[in-house]
Image (cartoon, grey):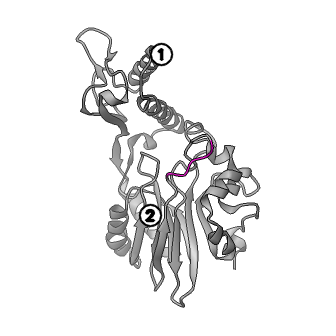
Amino acid sequence: MKIASFNVENLFDRPKVFNETQAVSDQVNDQVTRLNNLLELDRYSEQDKAQIKALLIALGLERSDESTFVLLRQNRGKLLSRPTNKPIEVVADGREDWIGWLELKTAPVNQIAIRNTAQVLRDVDADVMVVIEAENRIALKQYSEIVLKSVEGHPYEEIMIIDGNDPRGIDVGVMTKNGFTIGRMQSHVHDKDVAGRLIFSRDCPEYLIKTPSGESIWVLPNHFKSKFGGERCHFPSETVNPSQSSQRNLPAAYSRRRNQRHCFGRFKRYAHESGTEAIVGRNRPTRCFNAP
């Protein structure tokens, strides 16, 4: 049995700002996060409106709903007005006054990068492949059936991704083949800590994988937020309250099957750091190079 994980960094399209320098990407992501948090407030105070206005200008949305990296969707009602030869004005007084959101503009992934990713998946040829930063299930399915096959790889038979909390389309999922099948699954996108904050910035889904011999293992794909850069304050509870995160996300029956549990993905921290306890509890994780 071979289990692996790989960051595919979006298969066909990725946020356009991801192609910029780390400094630019972090700055735009931070501004978008701060603005989205403000836009979700029930009522906008004058101070809130001033911050919303400043962030809209910083993101290049002063004169249009579209800038280099960001789109402002206003589906019903209006967030702001743009008078001719006058400063923009936030006209909505709260979330109920309009329906819309911010989203990052996407750009096609370089064709060479698409093929290189397929070659890695082909060479690893894992029975169970955990994927990080995939845009959605259909894109991953098409990638497996078309691109992976084009480099003489063996397509995966079962593919699953559950939409997570990150609006940028960088979700985690799992693919299986060679008689390994996906059974029961559970998402943790709604789990919160005692302060009411979301625990996972993407998700920590649980997948029950059935082996050809009839055994069962649990696979938990993960993609923790970055320790640095603009995302640091997005969902702080991943590191602030690891012990409670562990309690909320590992059912008692699941904890009893500890030897059958496999956590994969981008933890973005070392095994001894407290953030890892959110998914492995007090036991130290085993390095994949030391696994049987």
| Alpha carbon distance from label 2 to label 1 | 48 Å
Determine which of the numbered discs, if any, sits on residue 7 in the image: none
Of the residues under marks 2 and 1, which one precedes in the sequence? Answer: 1
Dot label at residue 47: 1
Residue type marked 1: Gln
Rendered-image quadrant of the N terminus = bottom right
Decide: is 40 above or below 138: above
Question: In terms of secondary structure, where does tag 2 sit?
Answer: helix
Residue placed under numbered mark 2 in the picture = 116
Q: Is residue 1 visible?
A: no
Front residue of this view, candidates 13 and 170 = 170
Of badges 2 and 1, nearer the viewer stands: 1
Q: Please tell me which residue is depicted at 35% across the width and 56% down the height of the picture.
A: 12
Residue type at mark 2 is: Asn
Residue at 65% from the left image edge and 67% from the top image edge: 252
Q: Is residue 256 left or right of residue 235?
A: right
Residue at 56% x, 81% y is: 216
Residue 63 among those drawn in magenta: no
Q: Position of residue 29 (x, y in %)?
A: 48, 36
241 sits to left or right of 183: right
The C terminus: image quadrant: bottom right
Position above or below: 32 against 273: above
The spot of residue 47 in percent (x, y) is 47, 15
Q: Position of residue 39 (x, y in %)?
A: 41, 30
Is 31 rendered above or below residue 139?
Answer: above
Prevailing secondary structure of the magenta residues: loop
Judged from this view, the residue extending furthest toward the top is: 85
Number of residues whose C-alpha sits closer than 10 Å to that of mark 2, classed few (under 14), some (14–19) or many (20 or more): some
Residue numbers of the magenta segment: 190-194
Instruction: Give neighbour class at mark 1: few <14, some 14-19, many 20+ (Cα, 10 Å).
Output: few
Look at the image and tell me whether residue 238 can be seen: yes
Left or right for 126, reference 275 = left
